[in-house]
Amino acid sequence: MRIAVLGSAGQLGRDLVTRLTGEVLPLTRADIDLANPHTIVNWLSTNKPDVLVNCAAYNLVDKAEEDPAAAFAVNATGVKHLAETCQPFGIRLVHVSTDYVFGADTSRTSPYRETDTPGPVSKYGESKLAGEQTALAVPGNLVVRTCGLYGVWGSGGKGGNFVETMLRVAGQGKPLRVVADQRCTPTYTADLAEGMANLIAQGTTGLVHLTNAGDCSWHEFAAAIFALSGISADLTPITSGEFGAKAPRPGYSVLGSERTSETGVQERPWPEALAAYLTERDKRRP
Ligand SMILES: NC(=O)c1ccc[n+]([C@@H]2O[C@H](COP(=O)([O-])OP(=O)(O)OC[C@H]3O[C@@H](n4cnc5c(N)ncnc54)[C@H](OP(=O)(O)O)[C@@H]3O)[C@@H](O)[C@H]2O)c1
């Protein structure tokens, strides 16, 4: 199987390319620019892989609120062009989406399943919802919704990841104020990549939720980072209102799956994944 991976220089893409079975073609924006339909048609019609995995996205959530057109060009229109170009060549599209397609139901306290109706609260969430819908309109495609990614490569666009930001700021002796009213499941990209590689190998189609197990607030996650690292940090819980981000975030966006028994893919609890990440990052430091 020839599997092309767009966004291969991103934190998920980098972890995925080393875990796929088959011939892997790592792609970047230089090969396909999602905001430029000609590059999509040119590359796919020339190379015709069996599977195209899209790990690329416009994922600057706050910037998307001010410039929704930029987010929609990549996350909605770009993915529509991908899906429409893949279909006639028989290329299976595997697309990555987000827990931020939820959040409108402010009374929610139980994990969202694949069959739950989405309702985003931000422009980024709206753009990702539009993209996943066009991907799922083609039978045989797969959309994997995930949440709160952190990986050893960090997100280029976001300048790292949450864990590294916490450790850096605490290392500078500065106080940390972290939101305690957003609950989700931070997910290690190595675990997600392993799970996605299994789904791709077994030909899973449709919509699948895949995150580490359990849930926490970002404040609880930060506290766990410091506890596992043996660091005593000046950490204070705050509300989203106090934090004052431009884009609204879901208060609760934990993802559960009703497809686990069918796919056999189940991720480990987030504290175990965080401990594994901290060990891995320490191995890589000079
Ligand atoms: N990060 C999270 O917390 C999170 C949570 C839930 C879901 N997700 C989803 O998970 C997926 C992977 O996220 P990630 O954290 O691995 O992202 P990432 O590390 O920021 O990587 C995103 C990649 O997308 C590429 N890209 C951006 N615009 C592009 C365009 N117009 N054409 C082609 N490539 C483009 C970037 O390339 P350049 O370096 O050239 O810009 C970058 O390599 C995305 O679909 C994201 O929406 C992420």
Image: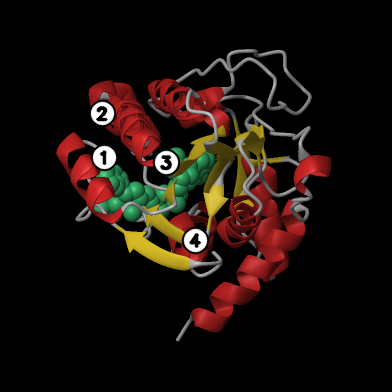
Q: Which mark is residue 34?
A: 1
Asked whether the residues under the numbered discs 3 and 1 touch, taking CB atoms below 8 Å apart as contact, a structural biologist would say no
The three-letter code of the residue at mark 1 reads Leu
Q: Nearer the viewer, residue 253 or 2?
A: 2
The three-letter code of the residue at mark 2 reads Ala
Mark before the other along the chain sequence, 2 or 1: 1
Mark before the other along the chain sequence, 4 or 3: 4
Per the image, label 1 sits on a secondary structure element best described as: loop
Q: Quadrant of the C terminus?
A: bottom left
Mark before the other along the chain sequence, 4 or 1: 4
- Against 8, is 126 above or below? above
- 229 to the left or right of 53: right
Per the image, label 4 sits on a secondary structure element best described as: loop
The three-letter code of the residue at mark 4 reads Met
Dot 3: few (<14), some (14–19), or many (≥20) neighbours within 10 Å? few
Q: Which residue is mark 3?
A: 90
* Alpha-carbon span between mark 4 and mark 3: 13 Å
Q: Residue at x 62, y 67 (%)?
A: 277
Q: Which mark is residue 1?
A: 4
Q: Which residue is mark 2?
A: 73
